[in-house]
Image (cartoon, helix red, strand yellow):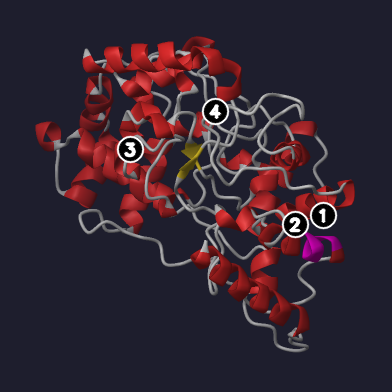
Amino acid sequence: MRLLSVLTLSITALFAQAQTTAAPETNPPAANPLLGLPPVPIPADNPQTPAKIALGDKLFHDARFSIDGTVSCATCHSEKHAFTDGKQFSTGHHGLTGTRNAPTVVNAAFYTSQFWDGREPDLEGQSKQPPVNPVEGGLANHEPILQIVRTDPDYKKAFTEVFGVADAKLTMDHVAKAIASFERSIVSGNSPFDRYYIQGDKRALNAAQVRGFQLFIDQGRCVSCHTIENDQALFTDSKFHNIGIGINAIQGDVPRLASAFLEAKAKGGDVDQIVLTDKKSSELGRFAVTDKMTAIGAFKTPTLRNIDLTAPYMHDGSLKTLKEVVIHYNNGGVTPADAKVNDFLSGGIRPLNLTEAQINDLVEFLKALTSPQFAQTVTAAAQQETGHVSH
């Protein structure tokens, strides 16, 4: 608690400074697309190169890596939707759907674990799972992917140039490294918040957003999980919390579900397959990885950057708007307000007592976390889909 208090005091001081710092009148600095972000962490065994990123981009968009040739990484993580798909649950091969909402790939490079339950430690491991998940790519194993990349002329050339491997020496680890390199290139900052908070441009936020920022770090206590530091903001602590989503519906069944899950896991059951094919097991959250009862119903804190573009929200896509999200927290981790609080709710989740006006201000602040590059991309895609392209 002392650390949080110090952090809040520091942020409050900078908040006051941002309000009083005059924006430059002439010769504004060139836009920095990574403003507000720390350096991207790069694994020592997988350094970034332009050629590797380009190869990863091609692999990311290759729908041949699925049983019916219709599903690629980009199917669920489309640039048109800020690298999500805009659906509650993504559509896999032959129209199948899973149990979890597709999180954005944008800034996933900064997470210390991947997937909602953190079952993979890095992007390399994450990239291997969807093609062989029964409701996503549907492949029995990775062999069809290796057959393609070992025989396709373009892939053969690219893997030889990037990794110096071909034929049987080209493994799934090389494929995963290329995809992960591409995903690490998908980062964005430079939101209105960053220009306000980092650069001190008091014109970057409107009055409602400024009030919402104060609520974010004060009465709303959002900053305790969606972290902000003095010179950067990832808006995630990369930890796991039970916030009362999904688990409430299976409260009475938790002992049986937990026991059955542990038994299946002990017999060799694949966690990735179980949580994406069985809705009730999916709601066990981080428990599926750690086997600890304290992790029941806990899911990873997602980044809030570009959150206005990535609806619906939560691991199960159950909340459709940002206002619904804020109301859920204002209720103390329940939706609707008179629902029973689940027994495993994280300790920091309690009613916020925000007024309707404060809820609206907090929503407006969240909209200020959008990077211009994705705001433009998503808007252009929406206009194209509806036939209303501006000139």
N-terminal-most mark, 1 or 4: 4
Range of magenta residues: 208-212
> What's the distance in space between the residues labelled 2 and 1, CA to CA?
6 Å
Q: Residue furthest bottom?
A: 26
- In screen coordinates, is 127 left or right of 222? left
Judged from the image, the secondary structure of the residue bearing numbered disc 4 is: loop
Task: Tell me the mark number nearer the camera, choosing from 1 and 4.
Answer: 4
Q: Residue at x 73, y 47 (%)?
A: 352
Dots 2, 1 in contact, CB < 8 A: yes
The amino acid on which the numbered mark 3 sits, given as a three-letter code, is Glu
Dots 2, 3 in contact, CB < 8 A: no
Between 382 and 362, the residue placed more toward the observer is 362
Judged from the image, the secondary structure of the residue bearing numbered disc 1 is: helix
* Residue bearing the label numbered 4: 343
Q: Position of residue 12 (x, y in %)?
A: 67, 73
N-terminal-most mark, 4 or 3: 3
Q: Residue furthest right?
A: 357
Q: Looking at the picture, does residue 29 appear above or below residue 147?
A: below
> What's the distance in space between the residues labelled 1 and 3, CA to CA?
36 Å
Q: Position of residue 111 (x, y in %)?
A: 42, 50
> What's the distance in space between the residues labelled 1 and 4, CA to CA?
31 Å
- Determine the image quadrant of residue 132: top left
Judged from the image, the secondary structure of the residue bearing numbered disc 3 is: loop
Q: Position of residue 329 (x, y in %)?
A: 69, 41
Q: Looking at the picture, does residue 187 appear above or below residue 231?
A: above
